[in-house]
Image (cartoon, rainbow, N blue to C red):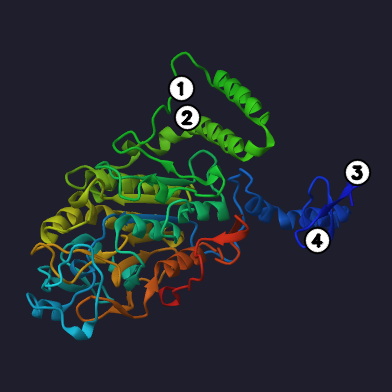
C-alpha cells in the first residue's frame, strides 16, 4: 500500500463500518500499489486497456480487442426511411398472386401507422433474377449490386420492436428506443480506439436533403465520454470546413495557440475534466487534420476510372458515389466506423414510400446502386474488403398491404439487411419471412443480434464491452444478443 494512503471511516447504508482510502482508491488501484518490480509493471500493462475503457479517459489510442478480429473497420450504408424487402431482396410470388385481396387470416396480425383495416395486399412490380454462383435472387432495382452478390450475405429475417421512424432509428443505432444512449459507432470507438492519429475515428456523412426523424442523437456518444462522439461531415464537395491555415498564420504559431488552449483547459476543475480532455483532444485532432486531412478528402487524386466506378461523375449517383468513395479513402487511412446515409428530409425524400413504392424506390435505388457496388468492388480489388465490414439496410421494411393504393407503410416484423466483407461468408441467404413477407419465421434476427455480430467481427465481446452508468454496467446489446453464426 502506498505510504501516504490514509484510511477513514465512512458509514454504509446498512450501518456497517467500512474503511476507504481518503483519495477513494479503487480495488484495482490498491492491487497496483501492492505490487512492485516487474510484477507491478506487468499488472499495470494488463490493466491499462481496461482502465481506459472503464474510467472513460479521453484517449483514442488503439486498444487490443477481446478476441481475434476479422474486421478492423465498419462502413454502414444506412438506407434511411425503410427500404422495402419486397422490392429489393425478398421475392414473394404468393403476394403477387394475392394482389388486391385481403390478407389471409392465417398470416396473423400486424400493427401499422397508416394502413387502414380494409387495406388490400400490394404485389410487387419488380422482377427478381438469380445472380452469381450462389444464385441469390436480387431485384432489378440493383443491377450493379447484383454483380457483387457472391460477396454479400443477405439476412431476410431481420426484425425490430418499433414501427415509427425515430424509435426504430434509435434502436438500429443504439439498441434502445430512446435518445441518450451511445450509438454502435461510439461503442466501437470506445472498445478499440482509433488507428488514425490525423483523422476522426467515427464519421457520419448525412444526406444533403436534410435531417432525419431521430436527428443527430441517434449517431451520438450518449453517456460515454465526449471523446467518442462522431464527426459529422458536411454534404457537398467540402465535407470539412476550415482545414487550411488562415492567411498569415504559420504552423508554429498555430501550435503555440493550441498549447495555450490546452494549458487553460487542463486547469479546469476536476468535475469537468473529462469534458475538457475531450475538448483538448478535438483541438489536437483539428490541428493534425489541417496537416493531413486535405489530402485524404481530395477525391481529385482518384483516377477517372475509379470515380466512374462509383458513379461520382454523373447524375443521379454523383452525391452518394462521392461519399462512398470518400468512405473507402477513410477506411484506407484507419478510420474505424463510417456511416453513409441515403435519404434525408421528410417522407418521400427518404426510402419512406407511403404514396408510391415504384416512384420512390426506382429513384433511391438509381442514386445508390452503382455507388454501393463500386464501393464493394473497389474495396475488394484493393484488398480492403477482407477487414472492412460493410452493412446495408434501414430501420425497418415496408408493409405487404398497400397504403394509398400504391405505397407501403412502415413494417418492423420482418425485413432485409445485408453484410459483406470483414469475415462474412458471402453468397448466401440467412433466414426467411413468410410467404407474403409479413413476419420473420426462420432464423429471426433482432437488431441486438446484428449488433452482437458486428462487435464479434471486430473482436469485441458484448459482455466485456461495458461502461458504468447510473449504477449499472451498460452495454450496446442491453439484454442479450446472439452472434449470427450462419453469416460467418
Judging by the rendered image, the residue that carries numbered circle 3 is: 4
Q: Is residue 183 above or below residue 271?
A: below
Instruction: Identify which residue, 242 or 270, lies in the foreground.
Output: 270
Give the class, few, some or many, for how many residues have Cα within 10 Å of label 3's Cα (few <14, many ≥20). few
Q: How many marks?
A: 4
Where residue 16 appears, as percent x and y from the top left, is 83, 62
Helix, strand or loop status at disc 4? loop
Q: Is residue 393 left or right of residue 55?
A: left
Looking at marks 3 and 1 on the same chain, the residue that comes earlier in the sequence is marked by: 3
Please say if 443 is above or below 221: below
- Closest to the observer: 392 or 171? 171
Residue in the image at 44% along x and 62% along y: 386
Task: Determine which residue is flagged by label 4.
Answer: 15
Identify the secondary structure beneath mark 1. Answer: loop
The location of residue 479, given as percent across then percent down, is 51, 69
Which comes sooner in the sequence, label 4 or label 3? 3
Compared with 189, 142 (above or below) is below
Instruction: State which quadrant residue 412 falls in.
Output: bottom left
Asked whether disc 3 touches disc 1, contact meaning CB atoms under 8 Å apart, the reply is: no
Whichever of labels 2 and 1 marks the residue nearer the N terminus, that label is 1
Marks 2, 3: nearer the viewer: 3
Q: What's the distance in space between the residues labelled 2 and 1, CA to CA?
A: 7 Å
Badge 2 element: helix
Residue receiving disc 1? 245
Give the number of the mark in front: 3 or 1: 3
Q: Position of residue 414 (x, y in %)?
A: 29, 72
Separation of marks 2 and 3 at Cα, in angstroms: 46 Å
Circle nearer the viewer, 4 or 3 = 4
Q: Residues within 10 Å of mark 1 (few under 14, many from 20)?
A: few
Residue where numbered disc 2 is placed = 290
- Contact, mark 2 vs mark 1 (Cβ under 8 Å): yes
Amino acid at each position: 500500500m502506498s505510504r501516504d494512503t490514509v484510511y477513514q471511516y465512512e458509514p454504509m447504508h446498512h450501518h456497517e463500518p467500512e474503511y476507504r482510502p481518503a483519495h477513494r482508491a479503487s480495488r484495482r488501484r490498491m492491487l497496483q500499489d501492492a505490487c512492485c518490480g516487474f510484477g507491478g509493471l506487468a499488472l499495470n500493462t494488463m490493466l491499462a486497456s481496461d482502465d481506459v475503457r472503464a474510467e472513460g479517459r479521453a484517449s483514442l489510442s488503439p486498444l487490443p480487442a477481446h478476441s481475434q478480429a476479422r474486421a478492423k473497420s465498419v462502413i454502414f450504408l444506412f438506407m434511411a426511411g425503410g427500404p422495402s424487402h419486397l422490392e429489393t431482396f425478398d421475392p414473394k410470388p404468393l403476394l403477387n398472386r394475392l394482389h388486391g385481396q385481403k390478407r389471409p387470416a392465417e398470416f396473423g396480425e400486424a400493427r401499422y401507422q397508416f394502413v387502414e383495416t380494409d387495406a388490400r395486399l400490394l404485389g410487387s412490380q419488380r422482377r427478381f433474377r438469380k445472380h452469381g454462383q450462389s444464385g441469390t435472387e436480387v431485384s432489378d432495382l440493383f443491377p450493379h449490386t447484383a454483380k457483387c452478390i457472391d460477396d454479400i450475405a443477405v439476412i431476410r429475417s431481420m426484425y425490430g420492436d418499433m414501427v415509427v421512424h425515430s424509435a426504430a432509428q434509435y434502436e438500429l443505432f443504439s439498441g434502445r428506443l430512446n435518445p441518450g444512449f451511445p450509438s454502435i459507432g461510439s461503442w466501437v470507438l470506445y472498445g478499440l480506439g482509433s488507428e488514425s492519429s490525423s483523422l476522426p475515428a467515427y464519421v457520419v456523412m448525412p444526406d444533403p436533403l436534410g435531417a432525419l426523424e431521430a436527428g443527430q442523437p441517434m449517431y451520438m456518444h450518449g453517456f460515454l465520454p465526449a471523446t467518442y462522439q462522431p464527426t459529422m461531415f458536411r454534404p457537398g464537395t467540402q465535407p470539412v470546413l476550415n482545414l487550411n491555415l488562415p492567411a498569415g498564420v504559420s504552423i508554429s504559431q498555430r501550435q503555440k495557440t493550441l498549447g495555450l488552449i490546452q494549458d487553460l483547459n487542463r486547469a479546469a476543475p476536476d468535475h469537468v475534466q473529462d469534458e475538457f480532455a475531450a475538448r483538448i483532444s478535438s483541438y489536437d485532432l483539428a490541428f493534425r487534420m489541417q496537416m493531413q486531412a486535405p489530402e485524404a478528402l481530395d477525391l481529385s487524386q482518384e483516377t477517372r476510372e475509379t470515380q466512374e466506378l462509383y458513379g461520382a461523375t454523373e447524375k443521379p449517383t454523383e452525391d452518394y458515389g462521392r461519399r462512398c468513395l470518400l468512405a473507402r479513402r477513410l477506411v484506407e487511412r484507419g478510420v474505424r466506423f463510417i456511416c453513409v446515409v441515403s435519404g434525408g428530409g421528410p417522407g418521400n425524400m427518404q426510402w419512406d414510400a407511403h404514396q408510391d413504392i415504384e416512384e420512390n424506390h426506382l429513384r433511391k435505388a438509381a442514386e445508390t446502386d452503382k455507388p454501393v457496388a463500386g464501393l464493394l468492388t473497389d474495396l475488394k480489388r484493393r484488398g480492403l474488403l477482407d477487414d472492412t465490414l460493410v452493412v446495408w439496410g434501414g430501420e425497418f421494411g415496408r408493409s405487404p398491404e398497400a397504403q394509398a393504393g400504391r405505397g407501403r407503410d412502415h413494417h418492423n416484423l420482418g425485413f432485409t439487411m445485408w453484410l459483406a466483407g470483414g469475415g462474412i461468408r458471402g453468397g448466401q441467404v440467412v433466414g426467411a419471412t413468410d410467404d407474403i413477407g409479413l413476419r420473420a419465421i426462420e432464423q429471426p434476427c433482432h437488431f441486438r443480434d446484428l449488433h452482437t455480430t458486428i462487435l464479434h467481427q471486430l473482436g469485441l465481446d458484448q459482455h466485456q464491452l461495458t461502461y458504468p452508468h447510473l449504477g449499472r454496467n451498460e452495454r450496446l446489446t442491453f439484454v442479450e444478443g446472439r452472434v449470427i453464426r450462419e453469416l460467418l
